[in-house]
Image (cartoon, rainbow, N blue to C red):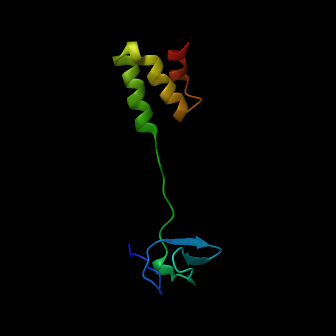
């Protein structure tokens, strides 16, 4: 990925706003070419974290309530974690 810098001062502290890029230091305003725009598509999955916490509920029953609450913070509808809370 190409590093985008301000065309006036060279700063990398830029904010995209209304189709333009604004430099927070010198207040310059410019547009980016299509190849300069960062890819904004991303996917974050916490399923592996939930599975690890549920595994800890089984292997460490003395802390299962704590781990189950962490799972419910990530997935409030997780039935398996709710069983440890009751």
The answer to whether residue 11 is left or right of residue 82 is left
In this view, the residue farthest toward the bottom is 8
The residue depicted at 52 percent of the width and 35 percent of the height is 74
Picture quarter containing residue 52? top left
Q: 74 or 45, which lies in front?
A: 74
Q: Tell me if residue 86 comes above or below residue 14 in the rendering.
A: above
Q: 12 or 68, which lies in front?
A: 12
Q: Is residue 12 visible?
A: yes
- Quarter of the figure that contains the N terminus: bottom left
Q: 12 or 62, which lies in front?
A: 12
In this view, the residue farthest toward the left is 59
Residue 80: x %, y % from top left: 51, 22
Q: Tell me if residue 40 comes above or below residue 85 in the rendering.
A: below
- Quarter of the figure that contains the C terminus: top right
Residue 13: x %, y % from top left: 47, 71
The residue depicted at 46 percent of the width and 21 percent of the height is 66
Residue 58: x %, y % from top left: 38, 17
The answer to whether residue 81 is left or right of residue 55 is right
Q: Tell me if residue 45 comes above or below residue 74 in the rendering.
A: below
Q: 17 or 28, which lies in front?
A: 28
């Amino acid at each position: 990925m190409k590093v985008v810098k301000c065309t006036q001062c060279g700063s990398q502290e830029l904010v995209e706003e209304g189709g333009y890029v604004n430099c927070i230091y010198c207040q310059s305003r410019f547009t980016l070419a299509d190849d300069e725009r960062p890819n904004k598509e991303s996917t974050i999955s916490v399923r592996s974290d939930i599975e690890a916490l549920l595994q800890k509920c089984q292997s460490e029953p003395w802390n299962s309530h704590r781990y189950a609450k962490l799972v419910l913070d990530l997935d409030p509808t997780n039935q398996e974690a709710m069983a440890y809370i009751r």
